Image: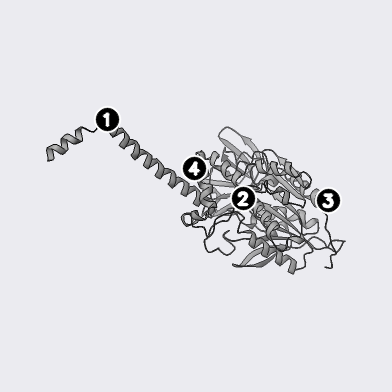
Amino acid sequence: MADHRRHAARRIPWWGVSLVAAGTLATLLTAGAAALTLFVARTIVTPPKRREENIRILAVRPDDGTIVLSSTVDSRLPGDYGLWFAGDAGYARVGEILAATPTAVTRTLIDVSFGDLEAATRARLSGWYYLHPSELGVPTEEVAVQTELGPAPAWRVPPAEPRADGRMPWVIQVHGRAVRRTETIRATPIFREAGYTTLMVSYRNDGEAPFSLDRRYGLGDTEWRDIDAAMAYAKEHGATDLVLMGWSMGGATVLQALTRSEHAELVRGIALDSPVIDWVTALRYQGTLNRLPTPISSAVLALIGKPWGRRLTGQGRAIDLPRLDFVARAPELNLPILLMHSVDDGFVPVTASRALAEERPDIVDFEAFTGAAHCKLWNYDRPRWTMAIRDWLAALPLTGDPRD
């Protein structure tokens, strides 16, 4: 019997062995593709614990106020920036580029807020710049917005002077994905000078506001509810008019709030910095950037956007991606929009922003920057960024009786 089996085994043709090997390889490839799809999908909806430090610190020279960084896309950006180092245990500010070679960039070292910069070896560039509104020399109140998940911390800054028309407009500043309300401090002086109260808010899963049950991002599809609560807070504290300003994912979030909040009648306009106008466009771009095959990117979208995928990603509910597409939903918008985006953003492509501007030139003022990267427009060209918002606010109609 044993001999018979050995002879039978020898009679397997070469092409049979090839088919077995091909089947095994296909199984391994399918398993690998599934694992990669799940990894990417979970990464998109899960708040990161750490940010990559992609710049090497080559030298710190406090005596002459300079720092030498390895040459990267970020370190070569002109302007003033924050510099996180030592795993976010330290923070400094850097300014003007003084010298550059193919491998190194020398910049002005403005100051070190905290941490041992001279002992650090790696860092990452940040558009935040300010760490607290009080650094602007303005009165700042720490307040809490009561959301359905619990109190969410926010900063409230009053206007420089009451408006002559008696109106009490507020701006609600909404930060982007994987950052905090600190990102939005840069806009405070402009709105304050225009007579606006500024409310810089936190929202679910950002590390400051309460976590949702699933501890997952909704890419604006759930976060808008916390902005709705902030709108209610502003109304309760005397706001007669609202402007919503969103940065990156915050753009997607304020657009959801505009179209879904019961307090939307108070909104007079939307300001957007490097916004996500359509998540499908943004995520496919990221897939291309990270060399993901198109089928993988499509599978990722299905995984986060279909009810059956939530058990794999940990989401409490699927993300309604079509509802987040404001190129397709452009006809529904009816308020003035200031849209600022760098054409070479590098993270959220300008494609959907440009498409929305082309669809609705009647309400969209589109400011296309070049070379400013993602959410670093203020850092890169502060005068232009400031003027764009100032002029837009000056033309923004505030309607109704302020006594209502």
Circle nearer the N terminus (3, 2):
2
Q: Nearer the viewer, mark 1 or mark 3?
A: 1
- What residue appears at the point 46 percent right and 49 percent down from the top-left corner? 38
Give, as a three-letter code, the residue at label 1: Trp
Mark 2: few/some/many CA within 10 Å (<14, 14-19, 20+): some
Q: Nearer the viewer, residue 127 or 396?
A: 396
Q: Earlier in the sequence, mark 2 or mark 1?
A: 1
Q: How far apart are marks 4 and 1 (CA)?
A: 33 Å
Q: Nearer the viewer, mark 4 or mark 2?
A: 2
Mark 4: give few (<14), some (14-19) or many (20+) Cα within 10 Å. Answer: some
Q: Mark 2 points at which residue?
A: 322
| Residue matched to label 4 | 296
Mark 4 to mark 2: distance in Å?
19 Å
* Quarter of image, res 281: top right
Q: Name the residue under label 1.
A: 14
Distance, label 3 to label 2, CA atoms, is 32 Å
Which percent across, then down, holds residue 30? 41, 43
Residue type at numbered disc 4: Ile
Residue 73 got which mark? Answer: none
What residue appears at the point 55 percent right and 63 percent down from the top-left corner? 212
CB atoms of marks 1 and 3 within 8 Å: no
Q: How far apart are marks 2 and 1 (CA)?
A: 50 Å
- Tag 2: amino acid: Pro
Q: Please tell me whether mark 2 sits on a helix, a strand or a loop.
A: helix
Residue occupying the far right of the picture = 164
Q: Residue at x 28, y 34 (%)?
A: 17
Horizontal and vertical percent position of residue 177: 59, 53
> What's the image's color scheme?
one colour
Check residue 395 in the rendering and tell me which mark sits there, or answer none.
3
Q: How crowded is mark 3: few (under 14 residues within 10 Å), some or many (20 or more)?
A: few
Badge 1 crowding class, 10 Å Cα cut-off, few under 14, some 14 to 19, many 20 or more, is: few
**Front: mark 3 or 4:** 4
